[in-house]
Image: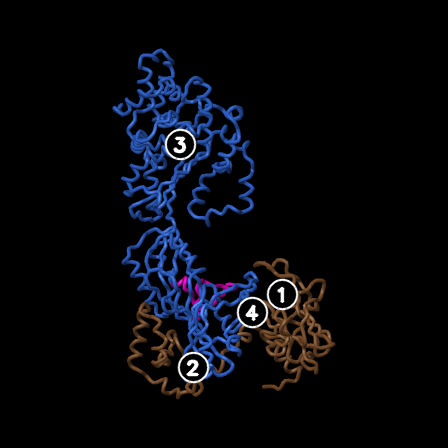
Amino acid sequence: MDDLVNADDPTILTGDDPAIGVEEQEIKQDGMEVEVVDAGTIAASEPSSRASIPLDLYPAAHELPPRPPPANECNYSHYYAIDVGKPFHDQYVFRHHNGLCVIGLASTHSAFMIDTEISGVDYNVGKTSRTEIKAVGKRKKNAQVLEGNSVLCKVLAGETFFLIRCCVRGTLLEVNERLMKEPQLLIQRPDTEGYVAIMMPRPEDWKKAQATLLTREQYRERRGFPVN
Amino acid sequence: MGFSDAVQELLATLPVHVVLELLRQEVCLLCIFRFLNVRDAVYSIDLPTSAEVYSKLLASNEYREEDPKRLKSSEVDASITGEPTCLICLGILQHLHPAVEAQSQAHEAREAFDRNAVSCILKAIKDGGHSLEGTFCLEVSLTALVLLRERGLWCYLKEQFKGEALFSGHDVNDHIVSLKEAVKWSLLERLENALPAKFDVGATLRIALVFKHQGSPEDVKFLAAASTGGDAKRKRHGQHEPESQGFAAVVAARGVTETGETLAAVQRCLASMNNELFMRRYQCPPTKVISACEITAVIWRNPVFVGGRYLKYSRNVSQSRWLIEEERMGQASVQEIIGDVVMPYYKADTYKFHAAGREDIDVRMLGTGRPFIIELLNARKIPSAEEMEKAQLDINGQKEGWVKVKGLRQVGIEVCSLMRQGEVEKQKEYVAVVWLDRPVTQGDFQRLSDMKELEIQQKTPVRVLHRRSPLIRPRTIHWMRCESIKGSGNYFLLHLCTQAGTYIKEFVHGDLGRTYPNVGSLLDCAADILQLDVVDVKMEFE
């Protein structure tokens, strides 16, 4: 375990091993010779000698970023809607590059601020439960089109409840049914497994919605996050 | 042209009065044979002229006294213009005949060239630049007028020779030798010798002989009246795009009559009326024609395939050409890097790329490589195995080194289904660089490597949900093996082998918990993926 946690001196790893240098050249000249060597042998040899692209099969520790760009950061643009319906009913709209929007509760939502703990999520709003109408097929047949102020679900906390809204007009593709059994995901992982729904707005609807939303910076400023 | 023994023998077996009548109607000898159900080699042997046959038959004692005037006139016609154009085959079969070809070539070189099928084909091959490679397949595309005229003559003969068993059948198509077949009997051997190449129905080189004729006014009138508009309507709706559909469409487009009816439409129309109705609508026997059919030869090679395995070393090269609003995504594509090198070796019109699955643009393909095939459309030439080795060196020698190939060679059409199978069925092996939001422990490694044949439920990933159906797909992770990265606390290498169609990135980061279980849920922490490589596509394709 120790060598996993304590970094070896990276300078040792960058040391030139002439034998490996030759091997790398051969590979460059003739791609046919490239084989994935058994992982054990690679780990035993100096991984950093493969640093030059395209042959860094295994990156060395010092080449690794402190953490990878999180999947929900690099693939999404983060937007926020504050005071949705009521003060401090803050929600996020994470827009994937493909145009889909993940809707959820921002960390400043008043549901997180009250003393009573969140006890449930109820998608049974509107004429039919949001869980019942399912989009089918590539063209998402049967899917419901909801308005920006349509209610997606109720978040229950003891006697009180909070209405969560779409924030953008679009097709409702999916709601997070796991929340019904595990509402604590809203608190534990609000940005990932605690998402509320996935919407697909038309480009023109997105444009309209975007004008009403805050960027992450604007949101942090409005909610008094410390400037980093 | 004399009467060879074969011809003498043949003529002796035919009903003389029928032959005479047909000759009077200006039906060519070969079409007479067709209507009398004569088969095989006779279509390619040397024949006397119609006039010679006519006078010979007439001279045979029983028919001496009948209609001597007609004999005179056809002798005169024959001496001036060769022979009148056959009103059934519209010269198609008549002018294919070697004797006629040789004759007309000598006399009227220019016109003969248009009519001579063999030289027409040779010229088309030369113009197209196709190499023969030993075999070819011949397809004959006839004008629909022939069907009309065969039917017309058949009805006439049925009336004229009521007692004759030969013409008692109802449907002309069941009782005469089809013109297509006769054309092949007449032409194939000479064509084989002239090319030279062997006829083979499976050959990739396709030769189409297309015959066109504008028809007599009666023909046009009949076709116009018979027009149901069905085909025309389909055309208006833009479903006919010959260019994009290759050879069959090219031939079909040329087979359309002047009035816009396709062969199939005329066939349907003829089938829908009985002989009595037909005779009221169409003049039987058919009227004489002045000009013969025009011949066009179309040469095309059916798709040929080049297969191999590719390796991709770049995280900025996509598998297929990827354009978003005219802008290229990534530096290049595997498809173009390989296809642009291979295509010139085949002098093809274009190519299509198929592979056993695909990886994301930022995922490398290492190890065994991924099986692929390139489908070359209308290749002019078939390179040798040595040339394919050279093509492989060309690709592997590119200075960027983004893509390499191995085992590049020409393969059969059966690999197409193999490729599809490989896409959906075969196991894939990957190496992922995984990060956890806490230090990695031996216990984590143990936990992951202990899981065999782990079934996961994978909802369609958000990143493709906009274009794919929302579904929950069960997928199997066959095994996992972990390896530490020296000096890094939170990263490790995850080797894993999965069922085809598993989204690996989503299995690692969980995709909002929509792939479950995932690496994070299995280790009770948050997991993310820094990079991914495919290292094996477990498929036999050598």
Cα–Cα gap, marks 2 and 1: 39 Å
Residue carrying label 4: B514
Q: On residue B108, which mark appears?
A: none
Q: Where residue A63 is drawn, which disc sits there? A: 2
Q: Secondary structure at mark 1?
A: loop
Classify mark 2: helix, strand or loop.
helix
State the residue position of label 1. A201
Give the letter of the chain under mark 4.
B
Q: Is residue B206 above or below residue B307?
A: above
The quarter holding residue A39 reads bottom left
Res B108 → quadrant: top left
Q: Which residue is mark 3?
A: B178
Where does residue B325 sit, x and y in percent of width and height?
52, 63
Q: Is residue B204 visible?
A: yes
Q: CA distance from mark 1 to mark 4?
A: 20 Å
Which quadrant of the figure has residue B160?
Answer: top left
**Which amino acid, by three-letter code, is at mark 3?**
Ser
Chain in blue (letter): B
**Which residue occupies the foreground of this view, B477 or B161?**
B477
Q: Earlier in the sequence, mark 3 or mark 4?
A: 3
In the rendered image, residue B56 lying in the magenta stretch gets the answer no
Tell me the quadrant of the picture where the N terminus of chain B can be found. top left
Span highlighted in magenta in the image: B315-337
